[in-house]
Image (cartoon, rainbow, N blue to C red):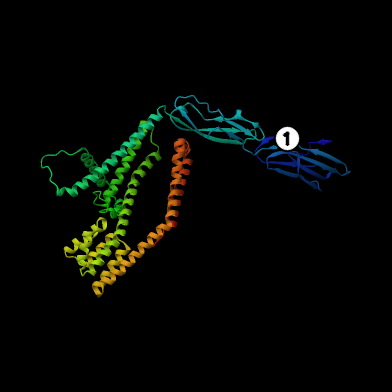
Amino acid sequence: MEEQTGFNIRNHNWTNEDLEVVYTPDSSIVQYEYEILKDGESFNKELIENNEPTSFLLTETGVYQIRIITTDTTNHQRSAVSGLYKIDKEVPVIHVKSRHETLKEGASYSPMTGVTATDKQDGNITNKITNNYNESYQKAGVHTITYKVTDQAGNEAKTTVTLQVVAPKTNELLFFQTGLLITVLIGILILLRHLKTVRLEKRIGKYGISYQGEQSPSLMDEIYGIYKKCIQTIKKMIKKSVFLSNYSKKYDKYIGVLEDGFQTGMDIVSMKFFFSILVLLLAIVSKTIQSQVLQVYEIVIPILVGFYLPDMFYQYSYRKYRSSLENDLLQGIIIMNNAFKSGRSIVQAIDLVAKELKGPIGKEFQKMSMELSFGLSIEEVFKRFNERIKLEEVAYLTASLSILNKTGGNIINVFSSIETSLFSKKKLKFELESLTGSSKILMYVLFCVPILFILLISLLNPTYFAPFFASPLGLLIAFIILIMYIIYIIIVRKIMKVRM
């Protein structure tokens, strides 16, 4: 006959905690054998050859039962069985039809539509689901609906759904904002074209006859004047900063390279601040039209974009300038060498290069010719040329001329050697670019694919990336992704960079 005596716990309903069941035999028992059943199957069995209590620690999910067969002093056997011990540590699962929902402002919305919950032990527990949806979620903005459900063992499951509530005129606003952005970009392009025209007019104006009467400034001239005044105002505000003064020195190399009218690196930094303010104003206008308040990231991102966007233009123009110098330098060396072969002096050779070549290298030789006319020595002129250009070939040329001036030698042989060396290096550079061209194209494609992928997904589903900006965790993940992408670009560029 089975009994339930000797157990400290007779029965236990579903729980998500560990259970400790103790069996204590009476004094007449000399030995006993226990068997633990888990979900109806034997889990553990052991013979205890004494009268001491036994503790059973149940920790895993399942339905347990303990059976005991005892032997007393008269060698009579009896059986005892415990109650059922139910342990459930598995969390329920909440099913939602979509993690991202888009709803027009004012439209009806049922947060429980398509939401169900199941549990391995309890089955369907949809009726136990709770959520934090309320009337405020019907207003325009990004809202997070949190669903919770708890099974009878006390295990809680939680999931979230991002609800994007848009104003009824979102499409019209988007069209207006796009048109506004295009208008601003066209205005900037027109301004840049006007600046180019003004620079051209200054260069050729001395060869023409201008009207001496009163002339009112054009609209573009007035806009350009306001732009220059803004730059000068910003410059006065930031020039006292030691950090910005040191930071502006990195832009000194662009002075004289680009025909933008700036005289110092601080002017360029002031222009970067001007563009940051301009882009931020565009963002403020855009959010004002939507009757929304700017978030922190919506302020930081436009400022950073406006501040660093001009760097892309300057770096591209500077690389183009340096590339032109490197390509034309060999032509200058060839012209000088031919001049030496025809019996001309160094001064005459420099004048010849200044007249024959155009572009950056021609301007540099014109500066050298002018410096020579002011009485500077050839060694000093080439030293100043080397400090401005900072090319390895120019440093080699300057050192060679300095040695020739001090010790003498055949200048034709020296320049022939320099010409051969530069030609071989240029040929090697072209061969290297040919060999690494496909790899560079692949590198740029890999750089652009993530950005294009984000843009494509955003066009197909504008709210797909909304969870990144709806919570601090999402912002942290987005920041980590951005840092990883930047590190990826740096590492790939380091690997692909070949030094000659």
Q: Residue at x 44, y 28 (%)?
A: 139
Q: Residue at x 66, y 38 (%)?
A: 88
Quadrant position of residue 356 = bottom left
Q: Residue at x 36, y 65 (%)?
A: 424
Percent x, y for residue 341?
24, 69
Asked whether 222 or 112 is in front, the reply is 222
* Location of residue 110 with respect to 409 vertically, above or below: above
Percent x, y for residue 21?
72, 41
Asked whether 23 or 27 is in front, the reply is 23
Residue 80 relative to residue 414: left or right: right
Packing grade of label 1 (10 A; few <14, some 14-19, many >=20) is few
Percent x, y for residue 158?
56, 35
Asked whether 26 or 470 is in front, the reply is 470
Asked whether 375 or 15 is in front, the reply is 375
Indicate the quadrant containing the C terminus: top left, top right, bottom left or bottom right. Answer: bottom left
Query: What residue is disc 1 on?
Result: 11
Percent x, y for residue 412?
26, 71
Query: Secondary structure beneath disc 1?
Result: loop
